[in-house]
Amino acid sequence: MPDLSVSLGRLKLANPVVVASGTFGYGEDYKDLAPLKKLGAIVTKTITLKARSGNPPPRIAETYQGMLNAIGLENPGLEVFICEKLPYLEKVGIPIVVSIAGDTPAKFAELAGALSKLKGIAALELNASCPNLGKKGLIAQDARAIYQVVKAVKRATKLTVITKLSPNVTDITRIAKAAEAAGSDALSLVNTFFGMAVDVKTRRPKLGNITGGLSGPAIKPQALWMVRQVFQAVKIPLIGMGGIMDTQDALEFIICGASAVACGTANFVNPRATADIIEGIKKYLKETRIKSIKKLIGSLNER
Ligand SMILES: Cc1cc2nc3c(=O)[nH]c(=O)nc-3n(C[C@H](O)[C@H](O)[C@H](O)COP(=O)(O)O)c2cc1C
């Protein structure tokens, strides 16, 4: 039997396939649809200190080979997450990665500190795709801001810290290096690409928020390229994502340097996609006589 286990810093996963933040709720809603125990990890929907009601509807629009979303970080807030969502997640028995967001380093650190006191959390994923307070753009677009957020979180927690990168930047390796320099244990990439769609009958935007984030197969080649660039630029492990729908997609990301892969949009099409991919990777390793998935990570043959 091939060895599927991978490491993200000190965090060990039994296999490299996880669910992407925001596409799998807090696990419980999917308990009858997907074999949760088989996943490498569950990454929760992003939580903030206070509850957020999110953006006005419509929040989703289908596109060719993908979808646009503008959920606006709707979430129940830290207290409700701890009291109502975490108890179920703890029982699943696989690593739980809690995705957190704030608009200042202090808010990220407050969340990290509070979550560190609890049992059952393996790692934190920093969703820095939120407005950079007092400046234009997102925290994830500003290398200094990312550095400050990661530093503040690292001071507040001993949990594994994974920084999630936005693809909406000129040079993603600059942001990746800033997160690494601040002590991030791993990186997740990519979040959604900015996009929009228009209803030509009404000439209104299809999303209530006007703009949203594009995900799904449409973004896969760009996401893969970014994973490759970041793999060559940093030493810390990567979780690759962006349009992974099947085993072939997942293997491409691993070969380009991802130690683990996340499925997002795929969960809306097939909630068992992650489980199918785990089986598919096992089969591929057996057929190619590769004993450990670790041998495949970053093994792109460039000639
Ligand atoms: C409906 C929806 C909600 C999302 N919510 C979050 C979120 O709360 N936090 C986050 O970091 N990323 C969020 N994402 C981004 C995904 O985690 C992922 O980075 C992105 O969709 C690319 O992967 P995919 O093409 O497999 O979906 C969301 C994506 C979708 C489609």
Image: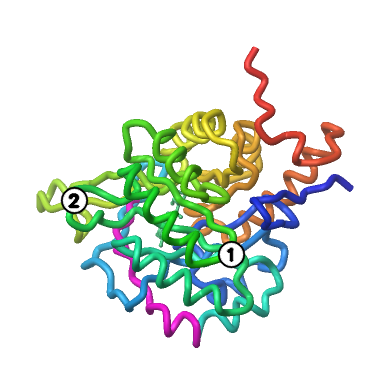
- Give the quadrant of ligand 1: bottom left
The image shows residue 93, relative to residue 164, as above or below, that is: below
* Percent x, y of residue 140: 35, 48
The outermost residue toward the right is 1
Q: How many marks?
A: 2
In this picture, residue 124 sits left or right of residue 169:
right
Q: In the displayed structure, would residue 47 be above or below residue 262?
A: below
State the residue at coordinates (71%, 73%).
93
Q: Residue at x 73, y 45 (%)?
A: 280
Report the front residue among 125 and 271.
125
Give how far apart the Cα atoms at labels 1 and 2 are: 29 Å
Q: Which residue is mark 1?
A: 159
Residue 199 or 196: which is nearer the viewer?
Answer: 196
Would residue 3 appear left or right of 234 to someone viewing this image?
right
- Residue at mark 2: 135
Pick the quarter of the image with the C terminus: top right
Magenta-drawn stretch contains 181: no
Image: magenta residue range: 68-83
In the picture shown, does residue 72 fall above or below 62? below
Instruction: Say what secondary structure mark 1 lies in.
Output: loop
From where the camera sits, is residue 242 visible?
Answer: no
- Residue ID at (42%, 46%): 165
**Which kind of residue does numbered mark 1 sit on?**
Leu
Q: Residues within 10 Å of mark 2 (few under 14, many from 20)?
A: few
Between 155 and 192, the one lying in front of the other is 155
Q: Nearer the viewer, residue 206 or 297?
A: 297
Residue 20 place in picture, x, y as percent: 51, 56
